[in-house]
Image (spheres, rainbow, N blue to C red):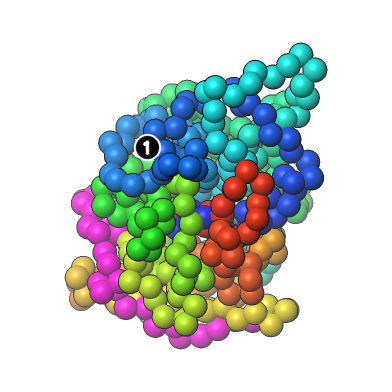
Amino acid sequence: MRGPLTGRASSCAACALAAAVLVAQSAIGAGPAPDLAAPRGEEQGTGFSQVLEPREFEFPRDHGPHPGFRQEWWYLTGNLDAAAGERFGFELTFFRFALAPYSATGPAPSGGASRWRTRQIYMAHFAITDVARRQFRFTQKLARDALGLAGAQGSPLRIWIDDWSLACAAPAARWSARAAGSGYELALEAQPLLPPILNGVNGLSRKSREADAASYYYSMPRVAVRGRLVRDGRPIEVHGLAWIDREWGSGTLGLSEQGWDWFALQLKDGSTLMFYALRDRDGSHDPYSAGTWVDAAGRSRALSLNDVRIDVGGYWRNARGARYPARWHLNVPAVALDVDVRPVLADQELGTTPRYWEGAVDVTGTLAGQKTGGRGYVELVGYAGAAGSAAAVRRADMPARLVGASGHGLK
């Protein structure tokens, strides 16, 4: 769920919404946006499309934007290897936030209307975990959907802010990803090895009992990537395995929920596990926590909180004193999985507003009684104070009634 709802729930996204809105208040004027399809399934009084029932997914169309909904995100995370043995983790995530709903009957812009006016803003996070150097670097960008500064289109697929982008030229083509910042530049070609996997109930991912606490959510959990990482001006050829998460909706987390732990694990036999453990304010796991198991043959199975046991085996504190889990034991009897998960670096915290932790991990343990291992990514939201409170974002007095979204849908 990165970035749940007000996203990987798919990602993390809820984290960045507050900062995005503050910038929007001072820098972005409301106005008609071009090429927006009218929302379907509006909830009375909101103007935004709502996630109320399962839908028919259509690819490649659904890789593109869904402007009738309040928020959505595109997540690409993974682990890379260089020929010399160096290892890197990476994250490139794009978020779209609507400041006002689409209005087919709204006034047309006058000849003197500012070209800077927009109904949407975009935000992106780029991060690199440099394992050999024991360092983690991140960069954030925020821009309005105006003057070509940022945007998303479906055919051909392209999501961008400035020179950062995630794109696919044609349905059968490879995806491409590009970003740069904090001494690193990444250019990758990405080839999904599995078709999109629908999470939740046929792609409808519910985050709490509240009617609007849901998103449409799918993943591509095994993506072969290859390209070039430039570090301090020196190019390094890299290859590896990545994960794509997509989520969109118009709601928020439940009022009792404070954050989540999102796991995306890729095992050596080709199987994958995605699970987001939603955390209530009392520290317990919310019953709407859920996930998806995909076996080596590509068959998926939905998982509930009763299917997965997560035990924390250690913690890490940032310089401000916020404490994050830093080691986990996951047991999933339904698929005979029993593994330990460890970050490759303790400090993989993005110092955005708000802060969250997202980083590369190693996996060791057993599957069906046989030794297994793998790699993955973990996202931790809601540990660094009020920043993780989706409910607080939800109830804030924001322009155009913009409500928070989580940050990886939850992931």
Outermost residue on the bottom side: it is 313
Indicate whether 324 appears above or below 133: below
Indicate whether 321 appears above or below 80: below
Q: Is residue 120 magenta?
A: no
Residue drawn at point x = 41 percent, y = 38 percent: 42
Residue 320: in sight, yes or no? yes
In the image, which residues are magenta? 292-317
Indicate whether 121 appears above or below 110: below
Residue drawn at point x = 63 percent, y = 47 percent: 124
User: Which residue is the site of mark 1?
Assistant: 41
Query: Does 157 sit left or right of 120 as displayed?
Result: left
How many circles with numbers are drawn on the protein?
1
Q: Quadrant of the N terminus?
A: bottom left
- Residue type at numbered disc 1: Gly
In the foreground, 243 or 107: 107
At which x and y percent is residue 155? 47, 23
Query: Does 31 sit left or right of 8 as displayed?
Result: right
At which x and y percent is residue 137? 69, 60
At which x and y percent is residue 181? 73, 49
In the foreground, 70 or 306: 70
Q: Main secondary structure of the magenta part?
A: strand
Mark 1, residues whose alpha carbon is within 10 Å: few (<14), some, or many (≥20)? some
Does dot 1 land on a helix, a strand or a loop?
loop
Residue 162: in sight, yes or no? no
Outermost residue on the top side: it is 111
At which x and y percent is residue 45? 48, 42
Q: Is residue 311 magenta?
A: yes
In the foreground, 109 or 77: 109
Query: Does 249 sit left or right of 204 as displayed?
Result: right
